[in-house]
């Protein structure tokens, strides 16, 4: 299965070289592309200095636009599968083969690297939000997704085409719900994730609350009009 690992990166100078290095060490045969999303730090320069495969955008267009850039690249280059992979070191490349195997064995359209198949969610505001999203997805689709906020997702060729062509296709839980409602087969594979190795999350407390509200409204209301 010809696979492309898409690594969206915004101001990840502290981790991008190490992230790509660990990916290449664990999966030496897999292709990757860093999407430098208009970073204001040295992310783009480090990609060039270390001869990393990268596409540098002139302005910051956000995760959705950066990821879609990678999906358009994957579609045009004829890849069979594309994996969303964080630039901050949280995603572990040693789980990629298990995700590829699961897609091949089950015929899944999307494989989610799930943190909560083997263990329960911890008691925290963030995990409560994840549980709420899981419940809304089950309510609106009849399908269970234990870790809808996981950013480690593998997409097959049909999903690559959908993301490459759809202007409103973002790598977010509401799009996962949308794909399920449209008949996509989603399976989960157990993974463990590391703590961020450098930099900081873009989600402050206020942004996290706004994100949760937008996601819930989208799953319950807006997606029925897509």
Image (cartoon, grey):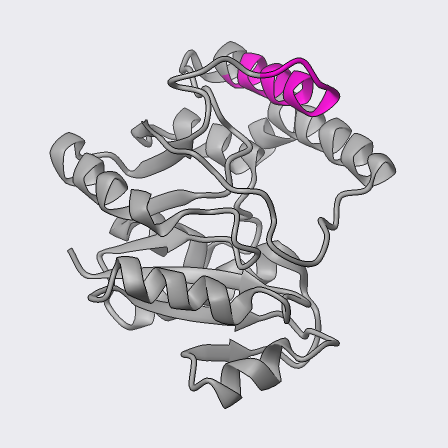
Q: Is residue 72 visible?
A: no
> Could you tell whether 16 is left or right of 29 in the image?
right
- Can you name the residue that lies furthest to the bottom here? 49
Image quadrant of residue 60? Answer: bottom right
Q: Nearer the viewer, residue 175 or 196?
A: 196
Q: Nearer the viewer, residue 87 or 220?
A: 87
Q: Which residues, given as a range, are shown in magenta?
A: 122-137
Image quadrant of residue 106? Answer: top left
**Magenta region includes residue 221:** no
Residue 147: x %, y % from top left? 49, 25
Classify the position of the C terminus by image quarter. Answer: top right
Residue at coordinates 41% horizontally, 70% vertically from top-left? 33
Residue at coordinates 45% horizontally, 27% vertically from top-left? 115
> Could you tell whether 188 is left or right of 105 in the image?
right
Residue 176: x %, y % from top left? 47, 33
Image quadrant of residue 145? Answer: top left
Classify the position of the N terminus by image quarter. Answer: bottom left
> Does residue 223 sit above or below 41 in this rendering?
above
Residue 34: x %, y % from top left? 48, 70
Number of residue marks: 0
Q: Is residue 55 visible?
A: yes
Residue 181: x %, y % from top left? 42, 25
Residue at coordinates 29% horizontally, 29% vertically from top-left? 185
Q: Main secondary structure of the magenta part?
A: helix
Q: Nearer the viewer, residue 99 or 137?
A: 99
Residue at coordinates 63% horizontally, 66% vertically from top-left? 12
> Does residue 173 sit above or below 87 in this rendering?
above
């Amino acid at each position: 299965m010809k696979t492309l690992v898409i690594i969206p990166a915004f101001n990840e100078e502290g981790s991008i070289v190490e992230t790509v290095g660990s990916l290449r060490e664990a999966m030496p045969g897999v292709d990757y592309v860093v999407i430098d999303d208009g970073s204001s730090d040295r992310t783009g320069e480090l990609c060039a200095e270390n001869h990393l495969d990268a596409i540098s955008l002139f302005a910051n267009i956000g995760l959705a636009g950066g990821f879609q850039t990678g999906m358009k690249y994957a579609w045009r280059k004829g890849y069979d599968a594309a994996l969303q992979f964080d630039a901050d070191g949280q995603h572990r490349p040693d789980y990629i083969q298990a995700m590829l195997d699961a897609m091949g064995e089950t015929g899944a359209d999307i494989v989610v690297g799930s943190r909560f198949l083997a263990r329960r969610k911890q008691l925290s505001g963030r995990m409560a939000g994840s549980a709420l999203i899981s419940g809304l997805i089950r309510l609106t689709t009849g399908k269970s997704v234990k870790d809808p906020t996981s950013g480690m997702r593998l997409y097959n060729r049909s999903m690559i085409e959908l993301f490459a062509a759809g202007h409103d296709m973002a790598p977010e839980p509401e799009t996962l719900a949308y794909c399920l409602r449209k008949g996509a087969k989603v399976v989960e594979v157990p993974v463990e994730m590391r703590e961020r190795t450098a930099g900081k999350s873009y989600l402050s407390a206020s942004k996290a609350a706004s994100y949760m509200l937008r996601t819930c409204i989208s799953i319950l209301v807006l997606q029925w009009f897509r």
